[in-house]
Image (spheres, rainbow, N blue to C red):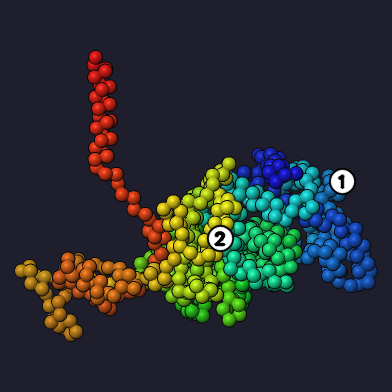
């Protein structure tokens, strides 16, 4: 069965649920049943061996777990004599037998179904008289890896989840990362390490703190396997949503990964991999989602641990927590002396420029740039994500920059690199083709400035070019006679007093001399002004779009006048025609 046909077939189970279930609850039945059918098909051929092994080891009084895993050739098993097709042979006891079948799975699999709250759904289906029909429907499809590959299974999961997210009207932050965006990020991550990754017996670690259903981890694993079948990638992740966590864990289980590496919970308040550092990391944290729920824990870590914790550089405003994930990832980088780390994170436009000098956001950017961690930012087209049409950016950070990149940042404007999708998926109307991904990867890999059709698409800057001094410009307070008011006491005695209503700030580029700038730009317009050095702050911002703006001069006036004259002459002729 083709991918779309399979998705449609599974989706048709919704017809059975209509009336007894709200649309937004369809996923609570369809997703766990899809996982169950996949596991059922995967274990079918080794079932007789497992049951024989179980009987033999039970007779000897030995714990059979390790032997059953060996019998299945996978890190999981089911020791029940039942399977989904056998359940259909006893229609009166389907619910009871299904519970028994689920109990036969190894603990890691049972944990998956517990996070789906599958038991509640079985009881609900049973009461509605639908359990037999739903089970029968799923028995009609073959989800064995020979029929549906791991990659196709991952895409299928994602397609189903996207449909349910649309039905339940999920917030814009909770979107799923399109496969081609993940492929681009994985390319950017691995492009400079291809030689190292193609050596035999390479073992690397990859981490996603917002793992969702495991899409990023899966695509990265597939990429590495294509480039070097002998390389080994150990994946780690953490996920907050119970259903997404259950799917991610099921996906990893089927692919033979160690599911103990996938943690459940909120990454910001409860790091599931506290002591670990990684070779590569990928993340697409929620955009514009507030972090009020975890504010207490995050502030406590920031204040008590400082730079020894994850949030030392600063805290962004509570309305958007995406920069906290950026800091979290920086804290997870394998030290440069141990081989270093590179990671990619998808962010919206806000982390580029939100917050003035001294704000939490500016201090985070300052930390990133002054520690020379930022390699590149790639601006993606709009309408790339399923639940939001906003502009997005891939930040690539590394603590093992090649010599040519040291002290520099590359900005790549890929906003014009897209093709229209044949059929829109939610807000997603555009996609990156293989050629677009190759072009962006080439620009990044070659580390060159480039233009297309007279428009810059790749630019390279010194880190300091994004910095500025925010200086406070004071003007004197004057009395009603226009005389400058002087201070009467202490340090201010005899000095002109500032007029708060005339106070202004100037952002002076970091590489400019503040005194020279002041002399050139301020004093000609306000000869009585001065700078208050105590209020000077250092800020950083990345005005991405400004660096790619190309001024297009308006048409000459004579040309516009000629056009207007032509139009008015035509209108006059028409009026004359009507009056005649």
158 and 151: which is toward the camera: 151
Helix, strand or loop status at disc 1: loop
487 with respect to 569 (left or right)? left
175 with respect to 543 (left or right)? right
Is mark 2 in CB contact (under 8 Å) with mark 1?
no
Q: Is residue 315 visible?
A: no
> For the N terminus, which image quadrant?
top right
**Residue with the mark numbered 1:** 89
Please report the residue visible at 49 percent of the width from the left and 71 percent of the height from the top.
405
Q: Position of residue 67 (x, y in %)?
A: 86, 68
**Residue with the mark numbered 2:** 441
Q: Quadrant of residue 355?
A: bottom left
Q: Quadrant of residue 473?
A: bottom left
Identity of the residue furthest to the bottom in this view? 490
How would you rate the neighbour count of disc 2 (Cα within 10 Å): few for under 14, some for 14-19, many for 20 or more? many
> For the C terminus, which image quadrant?
top left
Q: Give the answer, above or below, for where 572 lies relative to 518.
A: above
Q: Is residue 109 visible?
A: yes
Please report the residue visible at 44 percent of the width from the left and 51 percent of the height from the top.
453
Q: Give the answer, above or below, for where 367 lies relative to 137.
A: below
Identity of the residue furthest to the left in this view? 481
Q: Position of residue 434 (x, y in %)?
A: 60, 53
Which one is in front in this view, the residue at disc 2 or the one at disc 1?
2
Looking at the rendered structure, the number of numbered marks drawn on it comes to: 2
């Amino acid at each position: 069965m083709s991918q779309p046909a399979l998705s449609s077939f599974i989706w048709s189970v919704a017809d059975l649920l209509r009336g007894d279930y709200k649309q937004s609850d369809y996923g609570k039945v369809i997703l766990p049943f899809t996982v169950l059918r996949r596991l059922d098909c995967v274990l079918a051929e080794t079932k007789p061996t497992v049951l024989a092994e179980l009987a033999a080891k039970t007779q000897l009084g030995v714990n059979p777990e390790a032997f059953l895993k060996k019998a299945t050739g996978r890190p999981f098993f089911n020791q029940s004599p039942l399977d989904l097709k056998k359940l259909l042979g006893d229609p009166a006891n389907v619910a009871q037998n299904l519970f028994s079948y689920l109990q036969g799975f190894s603990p890691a699999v049972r944990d998956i179904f517990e996070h789906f709250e599958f038991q509640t759904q079985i009881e609900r289906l049973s009461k509605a008289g639908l359990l037999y029909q739903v089970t029968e429907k799923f028995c009609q499809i073959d989800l064995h890896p020979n029929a549906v590959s791991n990659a196709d299974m991952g895409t299928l999961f994602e397609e189903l989840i996207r449909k349910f997210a649309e039905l339940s009207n999920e917030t814009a932050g909770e979107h799923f990362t399109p496969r081609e965006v993940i492929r681009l990020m994985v390319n950017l991550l691995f492009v400079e390490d291809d030689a190292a990754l193609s050596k035999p017996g390479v073992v690397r670690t990859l981490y996603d703190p917002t793992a969702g259903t495991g899409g990023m981890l899966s695509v990265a694993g597939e990429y590495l396997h294509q480039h070097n079948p002998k390389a080994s990638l150990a994946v780690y992740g953490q996920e907050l949503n119970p259903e997404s966590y259950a799917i991610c864990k099921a996906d990893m289980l089927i692919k033979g990964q160690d599911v103990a590496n996938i943690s459940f919970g909120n990454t910001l308040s409860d790091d599931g991999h506290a002591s670990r550092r990684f070779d590569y990391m990928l993340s697409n944290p929620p955009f514009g989602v507030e972090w009020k729920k975890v504010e207490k824990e995050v502030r406590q870590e920031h204040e008590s641990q400082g730079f020894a914790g994850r949030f030392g550089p600063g805290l962004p405003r509570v309305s958007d927590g995406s920069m906290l994930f950026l800091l979290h990832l920086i804290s997870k980088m394998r030290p440069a002396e141990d081989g270093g780390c590179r990671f990619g994170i998808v962010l919206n436009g806000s982390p580029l420029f939100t917050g003035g000098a001294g704000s939490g956001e500016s201090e985070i950017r300052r930390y990133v740039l002054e520690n020379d961690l930022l390699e590149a930012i790639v601006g993606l087209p709009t309408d790339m994500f399923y639940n939001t049409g906003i502009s997005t950016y891939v930040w690539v950070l590394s603590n093992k920059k090649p010599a040519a990149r040291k002290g520099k940042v590359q900005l790549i404007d890929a906003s014009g690199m897209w093709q229209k999708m044949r059929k829109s998926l939610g807000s997603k109307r555009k996609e990156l083709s293989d050629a677009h991904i190759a072009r962006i990867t080439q620009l990044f890999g070659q580390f060159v400035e480039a233009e297309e059709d007279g428009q810059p698409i790749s630019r390279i800057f010194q880190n300091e070019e994004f910095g500025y001094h925010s200086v406070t410009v004071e003007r004197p307070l004057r009395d009603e006679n226009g005389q400058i008011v002087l201070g009467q006491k202490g340090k201010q005695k005899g000095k002109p007093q500032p007029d708060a209503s005339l106070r202004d700030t100037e952002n002076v580029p970091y590489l400019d001399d503040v005194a020279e700038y002041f002399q050139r730009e301020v004093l000609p317009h306000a000869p009585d002004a001065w700078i208050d050095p105590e209020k000077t702050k250092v800020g950083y911002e990345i005005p991405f779009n400004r660096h790619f703006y190309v001024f297009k001069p308006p048409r000459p006036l004579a040309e516009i006048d000629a056009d207007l004259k032509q139009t008015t002459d035509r209108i006059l002729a028409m009026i004359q025609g009507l009056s005649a």
